[in-house]
Amino acid sequence: MFFKKKRQTELDLLHLPKHIGIIMDGNGRWAKKRGLPRSAGHSAGADALKKIITEANKIGVKYITVYTFSTENWKRPKEEVDYLMSLLLDYLRNAEKTLAGENVVIRAIGSRKELSREIQDQIVKTEEFTKNNTGIVMNIALNYGGREEITNAVKEICAEVAEGKTNAGDITDKTIDAHLYTKEQPDVDLLIRTSGEMRLSNFMLWQVSYAEMWFTDKLWPDFKPADLRRAIIDFQNRGRRFGGI
Ligand code: IPE
Ligand code: IPE
Ligand code: MG
């Protein structure tokens, strides 16, 4: 007779995912449902994010990457892009005070050169201000695309080969890891996407190769700390094999 392992219902603090990735989707639909402009959804989404970071830090998660603006999001109307950029600037400015007070290390990942001077400067300031904190590392994926990240890594490695610093034959997955925006960070263990969409949308293509995926129909502004805990408990109930048995 076989006994099925009993489902764990409480959060196990000793077996947390090391790195959580979140595709925060559904801000626009959240606003539309309320007859509000899309910007109101983005603003509510930023509020939801603050609470989730606080919770993840409290639980003891070490790394969290949140998708805030993709390399494809420039396709949106200029008005929306401008609003998102101003929200991000505010977020970075305020995070320096509020989240730094919570000991959060803030980093931006993605291509910076397309961003405004003001945002680029603020990123440097916020990263500098929080770099010695010892709490959760929060990667803000801003103008981030998984393909752009890998392409960029390939370019850097090719340059090293051309300069004779690296031997082409010695390139391994570790070499590629070391050229990603997330270098020195563990792979994503748990990937969360809200709003019912089940796709990656160019998010951390390399780092999610063995991530457990967790989807919810909830729209991002409705995502609560309790939902994060539920996602982690579900993660802890999965059997991860990494190709083994
Ligand atoms: C996610 O919400 C936030 C960003 C992509 C910046 P959306 O703006 O994609 O919301 P929906 O998918 O249109 O509802
Ligand atoms: C992914 O959401 C990007 C972010 C959450 C920042 P999108 O709403 O842009 O993705 P698609 O277009 O539905 O794939
Ligand atoms: Mg969307």
Image (spheres, grey):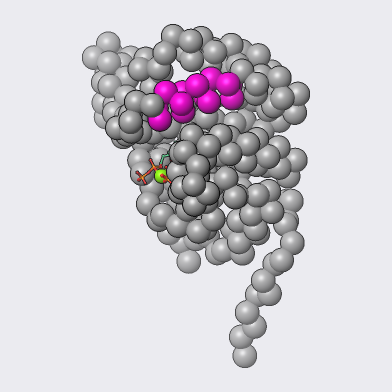
Residue 37 point in image, percent of width and height: 47, 38
Dividing the picture into quarters, in which one does residue 180 lie?
A: top left
The magenta stretch is: 80-92
Q: Residue at x 59, y 11 (%)?
A: 125
How many marks do you count on the picture?
0
Q: Residue at x 67, y 71 (%)?
A: 7
Indicate the quadrant of ligand 1 in the picture.
top left
Q: Residue at x 68, y 74 (%)?
A: 6
Residue 222 point in image, percent of width and height: 59, 50
Visible in this render: residue 151?
A: yes
Dividing the picture into quarters, in which one does residue 100 lie?
A: top right
Q: Nearer the viewer, residue 240 or 82?
A: 82
Q: Residue at x 62, y 90 (%)?
A: 1
Q: Nearer the viewer, residue 34 or 23?
A: 34
Q: Residue lying furthest bottom in this view?
A: 1
> Looking at the image, is 72 positioned above or below residue 55?
above
Residue 187 point in image, percent of width and height: 50, 41
> Looking at the image, is 11 positioned above or below residue 96?
below
Q: Main secondary structure of the magenta part?
A: helix
Residue 88 in magenta stretch: yes
> Looking at the image, is 4 positioned above or below residue 22?
below
Visible in this render: residue 153?
A: no
Q: Residue lying furthest front in this view?
A: 35
> Looking at the image, is 168 positioned above or below residue 114?
below
Q: Nearer the viewer, residue 34 or 132?
A: 34
Residue 147 in magenta stretch: no
Residue 64 point in image, percent of width and height: 58, 38
